[in-house]
Every structure is written in C-alpha cells, then in structure tokens.
Amino acid sequence: MIKHRVVVVGGGFGGLQTVHGLKGADADITLIDRRNHHLFQPLLYQVATTVLATSEIAWPIRRLFRDRRDVTTVLDEVLGIDKGAKTVKLASGRMVPYDTLVLATGARHAYFGRDEWESVAPGLKTLEDATTLRRRILLAFERAEMAEKTSELDSELTFAIIGAGPTGVEMAGMIAELANKVLPKEFRKIDTTRTRVMLIEAGPRVLPAFTEDLSAYTKTALEKLGVEVHTGKPVTAITEEGVTVGDAFIPCKTVIWAAGVQASPAARWIGASADRAGRAVVGPDLSVPEQPEIFVIGDTALVSQDDGKPVPGIAPAAKQQGEYVSKVIKTRLAGKPAPAAFHYRHQGSLATIGKRAAVIDFGKFKLTGGLAWWIWGLAHIYFLIGTRSRAAVAWSWLWIYLSGQHSARLITQKETLKDES
C-alpha cells in the first residue's frame, strides 16, 4: 500500500521544521534541495567577515535525517511543477510525484531592476556569497598594500554596504572592527585604520524595522566604530570603479549589497498570485487558494498578520510556519479537524554592531550594548543545529572576544561572480 507522499522543496528553516514536525506521520517524505547542506543564514555575515568558518554554520542535510527512514533526501534543482500530474520536475530530468507539496524555497537578493550590479555588488544569501565577499574584503587590503598611487590606495580601502537593515549594519560593523582592531599590525605599508566603511541607506534611518530610539543608538554606535552612515539618498549607479549616491560618485573597489530580496520563482511554478517581491499569496492555513494540497512558507510566501502587515522574512517566522504546516498535514492524514489559522508569534528583533554591542527589541523590553550582545549570542547558539556546532561557534566567539583575532581569514577560492587576473 502506497503511503501519502509529502514533497518538501527547500532545506532551509521552514523546510526542515516541516520535516521535523512530520515525524510519526503516516507518510513518505521527500526533501529536495539544490545544495546538500542546511545553512544558518543569520550568521552568514560572520563567514564573510572572517569570524566563522563555513563548516560552523552549515550541516549536511542527509546527516540531519540519517535516523528518519521515512525521509528521502534528493540533491537536485527544481525547474517547475506539473499540478495536473502532481509531480515536481527536476533539472536531472526526474519527476517526483506528490500528494502534498510544501514549497520553502527562500529568496535571493534583488537589485530593483538593475541586475547588472550583482557582479560588482554581491549580496549575502549562500555560502558561496559569503566566501566570495570574504575573498573580496581580504584581497582589498592585499591590493592596498601594493598600491603605488594615493587614489588607488584610497579606493581599495573604501568599502560600501548598500542597505542598512540588520545584514548591512552587521557587515559594516564587522568590517570596521576588522580594519581597526584585527589587521593594523599585520601590514607594513598601509595603515588599515584609514579604511573607510560606508553604510548607505535610501530611507531616513538605519534598521528601519526597529524603533526609532534603537535606530538612533545603532547609528551612534556605528559611527563610534568609524562607519560613515549615509541616509536619505539612494544609490543610482554601481561600477567596478565605485558607487554613485544621489549625484555624488565615490571611488570604491568593494561594494556589498544588502538592500532587498526577491522570492524564488515558486509562485510562477504553481501559477499563484504574488506580490512585487515574488512572494506567493497564501491563505490562513498557508496553502495556496484553490490548491489545498500545496503549501508555501518562509521567504517564498506572503503571509498576512492580524494587523494586515506581512510576516517578516526571518528564521523564527519560517520555523513557525513549518511547524504549523506539519500539524495541518498530520490532521488531514488522521481525518481530524484542521487547526486554527496560522498566527505568527513575534519573538523579537536582534542585530549586532561590531563584536561587543547589539540592539534587541522584544516589544516592551529593549536592550542595547554589551549585555545585548551576549543575549544575541546565546540566542543564536541556541538556534544552531547540533552540539558540536554550538560548541564550535561559542569557542570561536569567545576566542575573538578575548584575543581580538578572527580565526577564518583565509583566501581559498577563485572569484565566483567575475574573473580575476
């Protein structure tokens, strides 16, 4: 007798939580991802800024489910969905049948119609992105050491981060720490403390999703680290020579994009309505209207809260959605009444500023400074998968905190987005 077939596309927070929640269900589960690892995205910036190694924030998906005989892991890329035949089309040519489909395919960075900027201003969504940025950041200092002209030196030691959400703030703070605290004694010709780190935001303030007082604290803390905060003017051009902010051109060899995201093409695969960011519109139970066998969760979905605002695209939200969808599927298989509509429980917003300060917003409870940084660290270690990963990250952070040295300053790969001589 063939069991109910559940196919989950995406091994991120939402997809993994769905599979975890389906443990014990009378179903065969297939988990499809185009990479063989689950990635803890909130700490990607720490790989990019030489704090952590890639192995400390990513784990093989097969290992996570090695004891689950009901779970089959497939390494492949989804090209489309045949709703009539109820199959998932893979790049390998294989067709995977489903009775219930869960799309948790995440999002990529968006360039607001200027996709040509990606090669010179990479974003930060994958391990490849992080190692590419780490390479560019470290090579900028190496090229500066060899520069013969002042203009060339200044351009190499200028870093522009576009977008002042949590990722932009965290990147700016850590690059400033790297230049001012870690590298000064390691170079002979250049003074790395002359490094210019610019955080550029088109809106009126940094961390726009946080309250104004926390935003103001963050701006002040960044400036104490030496970060130049530019708000109120959009970037109008990005080239290999620099960035144009409003009408002003700034010579700059390293540009990092943290300004926007675009959902995966999942909505197109199933013909669902989508918003401008490509997120599929879902119903109260996170299924697609008129397609109850298809669920969309995480960054791929547009989920409305009670106040009409969309659920934020953060890890805790994706995990809650995955947990909820697994309950819906279980109740359907058991012939029981469906649970109440999905309700998002906001557990707080956190962002770090360098390696010794952070801001935390738990609603009525807010915190800034060093204590906030420790709470931020404990929260992220708690969410890490596996005892070994928690111990490794905790040790890396403690070493950096006590010694001031970053442990992952290796240039190990070729450029992934453009050719280098």
Image: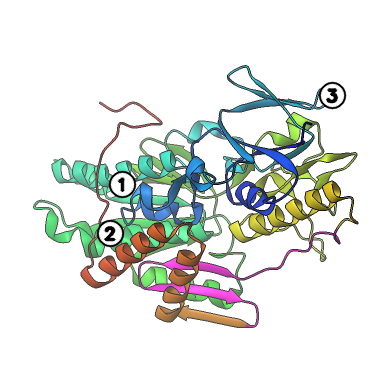
Crowd rating for badge 2 (residues with CA inside 10 Å; few <14, some 14–19, many 20+): many
Q: Which residue is mark 1?
A: 137
Q: Nearer the viewer, residue 298 or 83?
A: 83
Where residue 391 appears, as percent x and y from the top left, is: 36, 63
Query: Few, some or many C-alpha atoms within 10 Å of disc 1 (few <14, some 14-19, many ≥20)?
Result: many
- Viewer-nearest of discs 3 and 1: 3
What is the C-alpha distance between the residues marked 3 and 1? 48 Å
Q: Is residue 354 magenta?
A: yes
Amino acid type indicated by mark 1:
Ile
**What amino acid does circle 3 point to?**
Gly
Secondary structure at numbered mark 1: helix
Q: Secondary structure at mark 3?
A: loop
Q: CA distance from mark 2 to mark 3?
A: 54 Å
The answer to which image quadrant residue 133 occupies is: top left
- The residue at which mark 2 appears reads as 178
Q: Are marks 1 and 2 in contact (CB under 8 Å)?
A: yes
Task: Please provide the residue range marked out in magenta.
Answer: 339-364
Query: What residue is disc 3 on?
Result: 84
- The question of residue 368 being in magenta is answered with no
Residue lying farthest to the front in this orientation: 1
Q: Where does the C terminus fall, quadrant-wise?
A: top left
